[in-house]
Amino acid sequence: MNTPDSPSRIVFLDYLRVAACFMVILVHSIEPFYLGGDGTLIASPGDALWVTLLDSALRAAVPLFVMTSSYLLFPVKGSTTEFFRRRITRVVVPFIFWAILYAVIPMWGSGGEVDAAGNIRHLALNFTDNAGHLWFVYMLLGIYILMPVISPWAERLSRRGEEIFIAAWGFTTLVPFLHQAAIGVFGRAEIWGEANWNEFGTLYYISGFIGYVILGHYIRRYIDWSWRRTLAVALPLFAAGYAITAAWFWHCIPSEYPVEAPIDLAVEMEMSWRFCSTGVAMATVALFLLFKKISAPTRIYPLIERLSRLSYGIYLMHIFILTAAYDIISAWSLPTPITMLLTAVATFVACAAVARIISFMPKSKYIIG
């Protein structure tokens, strides 16, 4: 989501960044159709179907952002000090600005009530309850901290060595399913050194979003396929990944409606949607390979480039506008998928307009990146 360090543009990454940003907003526009009440709330079989079909296709959005950062910034070039200075300016300062706004400004429909002092205190440890999307920035900052440490390793690593790491990381994407299997067989979820007093098992150190960092580097260094080969690999890969994410979610939905249950049910349903799970990883790689084939600007590229530069700001502010957009559009009693899409489009357009206006302000990089 952040602007590359050099003034030159990598065209396909601009398209990818804009697409991923809209995908995230659409994900959050879908959430009201399965989250609510005591935690899990699905009103009808139709809502369940549309949530499954649409959201399962969008889970790659966050990993795509990580791969974009990797493609642009990894291995780290130049001084570590300069690398961190740019990240602080473009990522950390805007993040702090918007985190404070979420802490002190009431959300749409809240009745104007907000515990500003309590929220500010909470920011010392984590994001506030109304700004859950900011988890992404915490994760991204962790990736940035690690990048200069592993950059020398990545530069010396052979292609075979990189492939071995990616394969090992790929195995870790099975961990959510392995935990479920362990519960079924042994009655406990812990595997390979994990315990209720130790989460750092054998696979911990090669799991998580670091795999997407290495994937981005590997694709940049070694993958330059024709359209024919790209389609031959990417389309089946996406189809398989989509099938995994959608099938598990659908399987976990109870058969009687409306579905009203604690949040634990939604957590179980979303297991195949986790960003570092097998199906999502497959879909992420497939989409990245497809976008990489966009090699030249089109007529709409000036707009795409501008939106790409604004995408971090759009992401940071979008929950403010999305809550209002959903409340207004849902009152129109439109079909479920239309409500989802209209909410996402209205939110994206409004946020882009606000971010564009902010971009004309002095020091706007400290607000929108």
Image (spheres, helix red, strand yellow):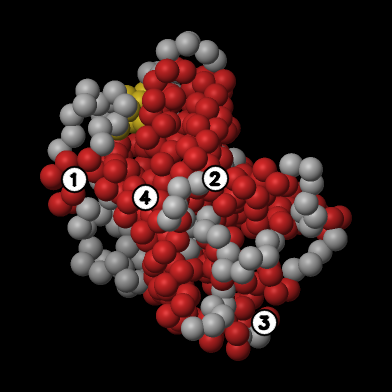
Q: Is residue 265 above or below residue 78?
A: above
Residue 143 in sight: no
In space, the residues marked 3 and 1 are separated at their CA atoms by: 48 Å
Mark 3 residue crowding within 10 angstroms, few (<14) / some (14–19) / many (20+): few
Q: Where does label 4 land, which residue?
A: 134
Amino acid type, callout 2: Cys
| Circles 1 and 4 in contact, beta carbons < 8 Å | no
User: How many marks do you count on the picture?
Assistant: 4
In space, the residues marked 2 and 4 are separated at their CA atoms by: 14 Å
Q: Earlier in the sequence, mark 4 or mark 3?
A: 4
Using residue 17 as the reference point, say whether residue 223 is left or right of it.
right
For image coordinates 36% across by 54% down, the residue present is 95
Front-lying residue, 344 or 54: 344
Amino acid type, callout 4: Leu
In space, the residues marked 1 and 4 are separated at their CA atoms by: 14 Å
Q: Earlier in the sequence, mark 3 or mark 1?
A: 1
Residue 352: x %, y % from top left: 53, 38
In space, the residues marked 3 and 2 are separated at their CA atoms by: 33 Å
For image coordinates 13% across by 45% down, the residue present is 118
Q: Where does label 1 land, which residue?
A: 119
Residue 224 in sight: yes
- Residue found at the very far front of the displayed protein: 362
Q: Earlier in the sequence, mark 2 or mark 4?
A: 2
Q: Where does label 2 land, which residue?
A: 21
Front-lying residue, 15 or 220: 15
Q: Earlier in the sequence, mark 1 or mark 2?
A: 2
**For residue 285, what is the image quadrant?**
bottom right
Using residue 32 as the reference point, say whether residue 156 is left or right of it.
right
For image coordinates 24% across by 43% down, the residue present is 103
Looking at the rendered image, the disc whose residue lies closer to the viewer, 3 or 1, is: 1
In space, the residues marked 4 and 3 are separated at their CA atoms by: 36 Å
Q: Where does label 3 land, which residue?
A: 160
